[in-house]
Image (cartoon, rainbow, N blue to C red):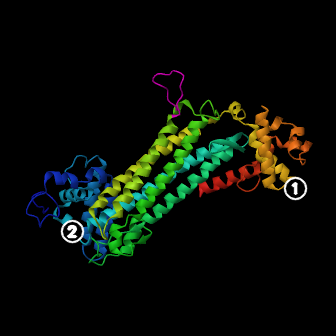
Amino acid sequence: MQANQGGALWGGRFRQSMAPDMAELNRSLPVDRRLWKEDIRASQVWAQALGRAGVLTPAEVETLVKGLDAVARRMAAGGGEGEPDEDIHSLVERWLYEEVGALAGKLHTGRSRNDQVATDFRMWGMQAGARLREELDRLLEALLLLGEDGVDRILPGYTHLQQAQPIRAAHWALSHVWALLRDRERIRLAEEQAAVLPLGSGALAGCAFPVDRQWLAEALGFRAVSPNSMDAVADRDWAVEMAFAGALLGVHLSRLGEDLVLFSTREFAFLRLSDAYSTGSSLLPHKRNPDVAELVRGKAGRLVGNLVALLTVLKGLPSGYNRDLQEDKGLLFDTVDTLLLVLPALAGALATAQFVPEGQRAPLAPELLATDVADYLVRKGVPFREAHEVVGRAVRLAEDEGLTLATLGLERLRSLHPAFDRDVEGVFSWEASVEARGVPGGTARRAVLSQLSEARRAIRR
């Protein structure tokens, strides 16, 4: 293997070896070592493409492919840890020299590290996205099962963290299901954007040898070939989209975590997390802390930070490949690793969580039915704005007299508006309130059951 004084694979034009501190800055192997499977697979297919183009003989292709198989076995056995090489590409090539000798030097014909790393990273991204969707499906399934358990349980719904209207517990669970389904679709779209082949783009101007890029794409599982070689080696849009999908998923998981923290408190007492997903206190013997939800909530900042960091890396780059792009992999690796840590734990917590029957009705205040009282007046022919004003005064009157809206009584209600009649008593029912909202997407039983069916179909797609 030809090398300069510093042992680099491409240092022929230099008189001096790389300074040790520069070598440390330049080195990315500790980060990109995880791309070894992608690098070896792409290299094997590249060797075959060179053979199809007449650059390599069939015997040379076979030797290179088998040599790369041997490198893969060494990597699978734990090799590569602590090696001095600059990156995964140079490590694979050095080991290939050890396996097949000088023939290894032909493998890089027509290929640049620029299109090589872009290809490896995209291959990894497609697989990572698929894994994320698998874990997200498990979380969605657990949340859906919790929702099914909550069809006939009524909770106060909140806006501004103030009680607003009664809802079915299933409606609350489904509100998170739909957000997570959108996240799953964003991840799928990012996978699709990753599936554009850069290999064959060279450093930036394309390949000087007649490789069949369409065949390369099909052999490596890509859906399309990059249309412009200069853009191909610099394009990290798919990685930004994956990081964004991960960041927004993190935000949605954080909001779900916040609900779990609140709902499992004694003050709310709607939900109980199992002991397996709770922790104790180092001082307070009675505590059951919902740490799974808090840890998930805390990871959102990390995911958002990775997105911002990646965008910042890209924002000032001129066209073509730039070494700043070495930073992209660590950021996206961390996003995927974080989500693969968070999703199974939260899925387990939801799968073992239980609604607390005795805690659900207690917090329901009659004022949650204020809108139902206004709707009652509307059905009597009163304009909604007037009805809103009347009910607002009724709530104030009840507060002044130490009563509730439900115990204010017909006489006082009639003093506020003559449209009130004895049938207003039927308004003060949690079941009647939720059942009144039967439009698609509402919290009536039939609407919630329809949502559950639709969500299950969406999860299975």
- Whether residue 203 is visible, yes or no, is yes
Q: Residues within 10 Å of mark 2 (few under 14, many from 20)?
A: some
Residue 356 colored magenta? no
The structure residue drawn at horizontal position 79% and vertical position 45%, both measured from the top left corner, is: 391
Main secondary-structure element of the magenta-colored stretch: loop
Q: Position of residue 365 (x, y in %)?
A: 73, 37
Q: Name the residue under label 1.
A: 381
Q: Position of residue 429 (x, y in %)?
A: 81, 40
Left or right, 98 with respect to 46, comes to left
**Secondary structure beneath label 1:** loop
Q: Which amino acid does label 1 sit on?
A: Gly
| The N terminus sits in image quarter | bottom left
Say which of 137 and 331 sits in front.
331
Say which of 165 and 147 sits in front.
165
Say which of 326 and 31 sits in front.
326
Q: Earlier in the sequence, mark 2 or mark 1?
A: 2
Q: Which amino acid does label 2 sit on?
A: Lys
Examine the rendered structure and indicate whether residue 417 appears above or below residue 292.
Answer: below
Q: How far apart are marks 2 and 1 (CA)?
A: 86 Å
The structure residue drawn at horizontal position 30% and vertical position 78%, both measured from the top left corner, is: 210
Q: Position of residue 2 (x, y in %)?
A: 12, 63
Q: Mark 2 points at which residue?
A: 106
The magenta segment is 278-290
User: From the viewer's perspective, is the residue at label 2 or at label 1 nearer?
Assistant: 1
From this viewpoint, which residue is outermost toward the left?
A: 15
Q: Residues within 10 Å of mark 1 (few under 14, many from 20)?
A: few
